[in-house]
Amino acid sequence: MTVPAQAPRPRRAVLALGSNLGDRRQNLQGAVDGLSAAPGLGFRAVSPVYETRPVGGPSQPDYLNAVIAVETTLPARAILDRAHRAEDALGRVREVRWGPRTLDVDLIVVGDEISDSPELTLPHPRAHERAFVLAPWRDIEPDAEIPGRGRIADLLVGIGLDGVRRAASSELRPPA
């Protein structure tokens, strides 16, 4: 007797968005629109936008950052591939590590999955150190945790908000 395979259970995934070239706000909105339209990613929430000083890399303009939460049954690698397609659609060029960009989409967590493969590290290896990820994430999921690191609210208290502030007119449109 064959036992039918169970459908994968939906998991929450969190993606961080950043832009410091071109129309930064519109680039973030383009990422929200593109990712929410992708099959298999059910939109849950989009954070307010934050303006942040760059961390690492060459001298460059300030970023606008936001975080989105989605519900999905997709494998983490498929989510990352969609994030890369969203970057490509908005003209992302990968010339300088941590350099300026039209759009950067980082996969922060997928459920409680932990991965240390060369293609994808989960949770994101520096998210727990980045106020530009933690502050907007806290706005949409105040009790969220990074597996193996702790509550994002506690992590944010530990690192502070230096160089990170909520942007004026900071709302992105959620998908229709």
Image: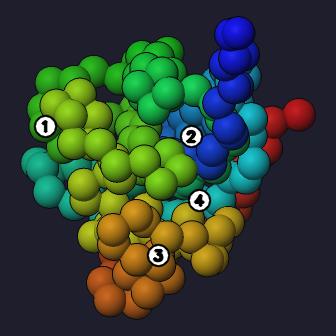
Q: Disc 4 and disc 1: Cα gap in Å?
A: 23 Å
The residue that label 3 is drawn on is 152
Nearest the viewer among 145 and 130 is 145
Q: Which mark is residue 97?
A: 1
Q: Disc 3 and disc 2: Cα gap in Å?
A: 22 Å
Nearest the viewer among 49 and 78 is 78
Specify the quadrant that holds the C terminus.
top right
- Residue at the image position 63 percent from the left and 76 percent from the top: 142
N-term-proximal mark, 3 vs 2: 2
Report x, y in % for residue 59. 14, 52
Q: Disc 4 and disc 2: Cα gap in Å?
A: 9 Å
Q: Amino acid at mark 3?
A: Ile
N-term-proximal mark, 4 vs 2: 2
The residue that label 2 is drawn on is 28
N-term-proximal mark, 4 vs 3: 4
- Report if the CB atoms under discs 4 and 1 are less than 8 Å apart: no
- Report if the CB atoms under discs 4 and 3 are less than 8 Å apart: no
Q: Residues within 10 Å of mark 3 (few under 14, many from 20)?
A: many
Q: Amino acid at mark 4?
A: Val
Give the foreground label among 3 and 1: 3
Nearest the viewer among 40 and 95 is 40
Q: Residues within 10 Å of mark 4 (few under 14, many from 20)?
A: many
Q: Disc 4 and disc 3: Cα gap in Å?
A: 17 Å
Vertical order, 54 against 176 (above or below): below
Q: Which mark is residue 49?
A: 4
- The answer to whether 159 appears left or right of 51 in the picture is left
Report x, y in % for residue 39. 70, 18
Is residue 110 something that shows in the picture?
yes
